[in-house]
Image (spheres, grey):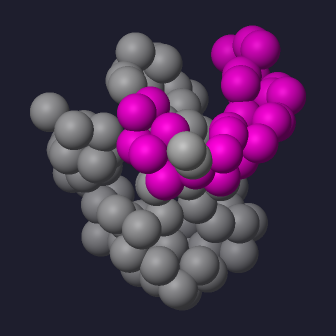
Amino acid sequence: MTTKQALIQFLRDNGCFKEFKINLGKFRKQSIGRYIDGVLPVRYIELAFDWRKTRESHESWEKIDLKWRKIAKDLPIEHIAKTGGFIGDCVNDLGHCITKYNPVD
């Protein structure tokens, strides 16, 4: 299963796929596939959009994010290396990261 498939399945299983897709389009003007190309899997939900500015509550998205992180920590990140860009190397479970540039050959 790809990371995109894992994210979509997770969102569907938790009843928030439609809301995630709508908010991502509204705030980032991107599809899920395009958005995840430059983000670590563990941060997909955290960085997608401003939770406070959604119809759903900040607390709702925070619960979903924490649940996702438990799954995402074991997902591969090869897609970032292929596309280049910035990678956040998470140093703890709260997502505090050190960012470095990852150039593409």
Q: Is residue 48 above or below residue 100?
A: below
Q: Quadrant of residue 18?
A: bottom left
Q: Quadrant of the C terminus?
A: top right
Q: Which sits in the foreground, 19 or 25?
A: 25
**Residue at screen point 40% across, 33% down:** 78
Q: Which residues are magenta?
A: 77-103
Tell whether 24 sits left or right of 50: left
Q: Which sits in the foreground, 6 or 18?
A: 6
Whether residue 61 can be seen here: no
Q: Position of residue 14 (x, y in %)?
A: 29, 44
Q: Position of residue 36 (x, y in %)?
A: 46, 55
Residue 82 on the magenta span = yes
Tell whether 88 sits left or right of 11: right
Residue 5 on the magenta span = no
Q: Position of residue 37 (x, y in %)?
A: 46, 55
Whether residue 25 can be seen here: yes
Q: Is residue 50 above or below residue 94?
A: below
Q: Is residue 12 above or below residue 43?
A: below
Tell whether 43 sits left or right of 91: left
Q: Is residue 38 above or below residue 91?
A: below
**Residue at screen point 68% across, 40% down:** 102
Q: Position of residue 63 (x, y in %)?
A: 55, 37
Q: Quadrant of the N terminus?
A: top left
